Amino acid sequence: MLYLKKYFTEGLIQFTILLSLIGVRVDVDTYLSNQLPPLREIILGSSSAYTQTQFHNLRNTLDGYGIHPKCVDLDRFFTTQRLLNQVRQLDRLSVPSTELNTWLVHRDSETVVSASSQSSPSITLDNGAGLEDINNPDATPAMRGGSGAPESTYNLNAADGSLGAVAPEGNQEQGSRDGNDDLTKEDIDLIDILWRQDIDLGAGREVFNYSNRQKDSEEEKPSPQENKDSSEEQESWRNGVNLQGEQRVDGETGESIPEQLPSLGSQTSLSLQECLRLLEATFPFGEESEFPAPVVTPEIAVSNEEVPSTSQGLHLAPQLPTAEPPLDLEQQWQDIMAIMELQAMEVNSTSPQTNSSNVTITSGTTESNTVGNFGLSRSTPINQDVSLHQASLPSCSQDFPQIFNPQLDSVSITPRTTMLRLSSSNSTNINSTFGATNLTGIFLPSHINSSSNNITSTPLLPDPFSTLLEECMLDEISLLDLAMEEGFSQAQASQLEDELDSDSGLSLDSSHSPASPSSSETSCSSAASSSSTSATFSEEGAVGYSTDSEVAAVETEEGAVGGYQPGYSKLCRMSYQDPSQFHSLPQLDSISHNHTYNLPLSSAFSEHPELPISTGKKTVREKHNSKLQPPQELLDKHSSRDERRARAMKIPFSNDKIINLPVEEFNELLAKHHLSEGQLALIRDIRRRGKNKLAAQNCRKRKLDTITNLEQGVQDLRRDKARLLKEKMEFIRSIRQMKQKMQSLYQEVFTQLRDEEGRPYPPSEYSLQYSADGSVLIMPRGMTTAEQNHKPEKKQKDKKK
DNA sequence: GAAGTGTGTCATCAT
DNA sequence: GGATGATGACACACT
């Protein structure tokens, strides 16, 4: 998180410096406080930035209702407000206000030019909805990607349409300003960027021929009368003419608008248009602006009420509540949270964080409602002329195809704030604002964009900056995967090797055993057999040695002689595990504790005198006992209980055989010897306990393996999740590109259509729609779907053009 | 001396 | 029904 903070903080500072260097003053305060709550939260600290649910709660809280005085959220609220105020004050001290609004005006004319001359998708299809399959009306909503906020789509369309309607006027005025038909450098640059973008999308270069564009632009320049019509159309657009097929009748204009769209969308578009008008009044197109490249930011949803007088500049109020956030926004957040969780896995990277922030930025920028989600007051006015996000954050946009497409300014407010998306219009503003010079490299930190200086000279993806950011994040995810894989492999390598070595589950670090449990058991048995102590009790099967209690009596007597000390008994634990037999028993190959007490004491002392038996208290005890006891008694103390019992009962064979012999051989062995009931019972107990001991060891080993496997499974799942998220982002990007292409094609086709009199079809009245046979129809927008179905033959045009 | 760990053992169940 | 394996539970030793 600290990295993320640092990254964004430094990025903002750098960006602010850059803007100041080129003459633009930026108000970060507005940016932080109003435009991009997630970014603000990230910079300020993790508050609600990672708890989507808390956003809603806090949002309600900040609204002043829905919170109980004793609610725990209250503290969080005050804390958030306090921190926010502190940061705001800090920003005010360092960053002045900006006056970017002037740029917006000129952008309007540029948008007009680009929209008309470049045949770019000023008429938004919104997910390609402009081209509808008549026979499949449902396809259009499906293409909308399940957006939960179609209002924005509608707004975009309306805004775009308004822009398109204004286009001739803008052209005219720009023509009067320029005095010729030559495109300005900004126009050329914009076109060039668009061309590169579409080239990446597969469009031919001839489509983007400047002369052709210019010619088309001239052809499409309407007459004054047409301008008048355009104004009327503009009004209708403003009131919510939908470019899409789904429409309902608007209460004011009588035109059809989408049913699922609330009136807010219309309001937004109207506000936008009003904004443009205000801009026109403030900064006539014919006048030389004091700013190099005025830009219109149609993506900014400005309500009528929130548009102040133009003398104060454009007071944009992007926090206008437009539509509910997309339904998948929360899911996107969850995905981001998942990535952040992955980041917590010791993968230091800033790129994923950047993308995460991009998401938040997107949320705050493209959807003002999101502001509420992050606990910001929606009523907070923007006192600055232009907020920083309008110029800078687009660089971080994930809306790749739209970044460098000026035409998309009009459609930049995409309703569905898909994951990692930013307002495309913002980036467009940047692009246009700076004379179509690709400032991505400028905005990009050098360590992120190594080719920043070459962006303008190299073919660009629709959104190099965003692409870079996203790819950085994706790379980080990949690195994460690698790190996880490598980390896991390294951490688990030895264990995996052990597991591969033996499935018996009894890998007990045999390799580290300085001495394999060789003949300890035999030595113990022999020692026991030769032990005078055992001889003392070996006679009687009369002991009735069938129960441990009885054996205990024997042991007690043993203790009377040598004293039973459990500590010593451990020295001969596993003594029955004769290595020679282990080798013959594959399941026991791995059974090898690092218990050197399995060695015969004599050999152990001779070969490894420094080993276990000479360590710790045992050494002291042993030294002490060695002074008091004969060596054989000492050896006997190193035997296990069962071994001592066996010695006491004079069992004629070793415990090792008792335990490890196959049942048939075991039975034969018992048959060979005449054994008392007590001896037989002891032998069976020894066998049972010995096998159970091994079973217990196996069981524990399996438990450990299970735990290890579960841990590995968790890591694998996390890795898969990261991979799927990466794929998802790639899919989103691909879909976005396809939509962009669709919009471009639609615009390309539509702008070339002419009626019988050679006039272009006003986009406010007509739209292109697919038919089942693959042909494209141009349909009046007022027609309902049913009517369209009944009149599919109207004005059919061949798409080939 | 408490807590954690490793190990052996027993009881129980399943095969 | 006995042998065997698996496993939970417990006790003990050790750190």
Image (tube, coloured by chain):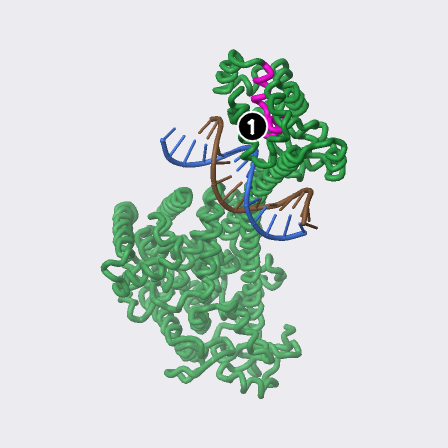
Chain colours: A green, B blue, C brown
Question: Is disc 1 placed on a helix, strand or loop?
Answer: helix
Give me the chain letter of mark 1.
Answer: A
* A684 in magenta: no
Frontmost residue, A199 versus A146: A146
User: How far across and down, in percent of the image, does residue A733 sit?
Assistant: 54, 58
Question: Does the image show residue A588?
Answer: yes
Question: Does the image show residue A435?
Answer: no
* A761 over A327 or under it: above or below: below
The C terminus of chain A, quarter of image = bottom right
In the visual, does A674 lie left or right of A127? right
* Secondary structure character of the magenta stretch overall: helix
User: How far across and down, in percent of the image, does residue A634 sit?
Assistant: 57, 17
* A637 in magenta: yes
Judged from this view, the residue extending furthest toward the top is A627
- The residue that mark 1 highlights is A554
In the visual, does A547 lie left or right of A264? right
Mark 1 packing: few (<14 Cα in 10 Å), some, or many (20+)? many
User: How far across and down, in percent of the image, does residue A755 sit?
Assistant: 56, 81
Q: What are the residue bounds of the magenta stretch?
A: A631-647
Frontmost residue, A272 versus A233: A272
